C-alpha cells in the first residue's frame, strides 16, 4: 500500500524479506531484498544496509537465473553508485580521478573537448540536456575554469583525450 502512496517503507520491505525467507520462496526474497535496498536509498539513505540488501538480492537472482530482476538490481546499484562486484579491490586512482571528476564528468568533458553542445552531449549519453548542462557546470567548477573552451584546453594540455576526443594511444611529447 505504501508504494501506491508514493512511499516505500524500509521496515515493511524488511518484514517482507523475513516472511518470504520463512516460507522458503527465494525469488520473492530476492525481489523484496531489491525493494528493501531501494527503500533504504530513497527514504533515508542508509548505504550500508542498502548495499547488503542489494548484494543478497543480486546473489539470489543470479542463482535463480532471474535475469530481468538481476538487471533491475544492477541498475539500481549503478544509479546509487554501489559496486556489487564480488571481492574486487578498488582501482588505483588515475590522473583523471585526481582532477576530482567522476567517470561521467570525464565522458562529458571528452564530448565538450570534441566541441559538442549540451543537447548533443545529452543525445549521445542518453541524458537530458539539463543534466548535461549540470555536468558541464560541475566540470567547470572542479577544474577552476570559466568556460567550455578553457575546460577543453586544459583537457588537451593534460593529454586526457587524443585527437577529436579519442583517448591517446601513447604518451604525448612535451611541446
Image: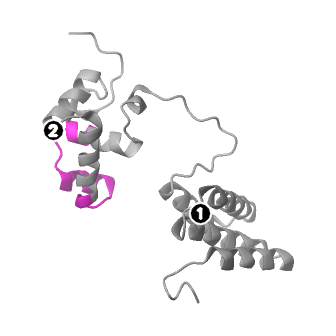
Query: Quick one: 79 or 69, which is closer to the camera?
Result: 79
Q: Up-down: is 121 above or below 142?
A: below
Q: Looking at the image, which residue is at 16% across and 32% down?
A: 150
**In the rendered view, how is the structure colored?**
one colour
Task: Estimate how packed mark 2 is, as few (under 14), some (14 to 19) or many (20 or more) residues with alpha carbons within 10 Å.
Answer: few
What is the quadrant of residue 61 in the picture? bottom right
Contact check, label 2 and label 1, Cβ < 8 Å = no
Task: Describe residue 66's horizontal placement relative to residue 91 as left or right.
Answer: right
Give x and y (percent) for residue 147: 14, 39
Give x and y (percent) for residue 101: 37, 38
Q: How far apart, in angstroms, are the residues tagged by discs 2 and 1?
A: 39 Å
Residue picked out by circle 2: 146
Q: Up-down: is 52 above or below 94?
A: below
Give x and y (percent) for residue 107: 33, 42
Query: Quick one: 14 or 164, which is closer to the camera?
Result: 14
Picture disc at residue 73 = 1
Q: Main secondary structure of the magenta part?
A: helix
Q: Looking at the image, which residue is at 74% across and 72% down?
A: 29
Q: Looking at the image, which residue is at 63% across and 61% down?
A: 50
Can you name the residue that lies furthest to the top here?
A: 174
Identify the magenta region.
110-130
Query: Quick one: 11 or 158, which is closer to the camera?
Result: 11
Task: Describe residue 73's horizontal placement relative to residue 53 as left or right.
Answer: left
The quadrant of the image that shows the N terminus is: bottom right
Where disc 1 sits, the SS reads helix
Q: Quick check: is 121 in the magenta stretch?
A: yes
Picture disc at residue 148 = none
Task: Estimate how packed mark 1 is, as few (under 14), some (14 to 19) or many (20 or more) residues with alpha carbons within 10 Å.
Answer: many
Task: Describe residue 88's horizontal placement relative to residue 74 as left or right.
Answer: right
Amino acid at each position: 500500500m505504501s508504494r501506491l502512496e508514493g512511499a516505500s517503507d524500509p521496515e515493511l520491505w524488511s518484514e517482507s524479506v523475513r516472511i518470504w525467507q520463512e516460507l522458503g520462496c527465494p525469488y520473492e526474497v530476492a525481489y523484496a531484498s531489491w525493494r528493501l535496498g531501494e527503500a533504504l536509498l530513497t527514504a533515508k539513505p542508509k548505504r550500508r544496509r542498502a548495499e547488503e540488501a542489494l548484494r543478497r538480492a543480486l546473489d539470489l537472482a543470479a542463482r535463480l537465473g532471474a535475469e530481468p530482476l538481476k538487471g533491475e538490481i544492477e541498475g539500481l546499484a549503478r544509479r546509487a553508485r554501489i559496486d556489487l562486484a564480488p571481492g574486487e579491490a578498488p582501482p588505483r586512482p588515475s590522473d583523471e580521478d585526481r582532477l576530482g571528476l567522476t567517470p561521467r564528468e570525464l565522458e562529458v568533458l571528452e564530448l565538450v573537448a570534441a566541441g559538442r553542445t549540451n543537447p548533443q552531449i545529452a543525445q549521445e549519453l542518453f541524458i537530458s540536456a539539463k543534466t548535461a548542462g549540470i555536468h558541464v557546470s560541475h566540470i567547470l567548477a572542479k577544474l577552476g575554469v570559466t568556460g567550455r573552451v578553457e575546460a577543453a584546453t586544459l583537457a588537451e594540455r593534460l593529454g586526457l583525450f587524443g585527437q577529436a576526443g579519442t583517448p591517446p594511444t601513447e604518451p604525448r611529447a612535451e611541446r
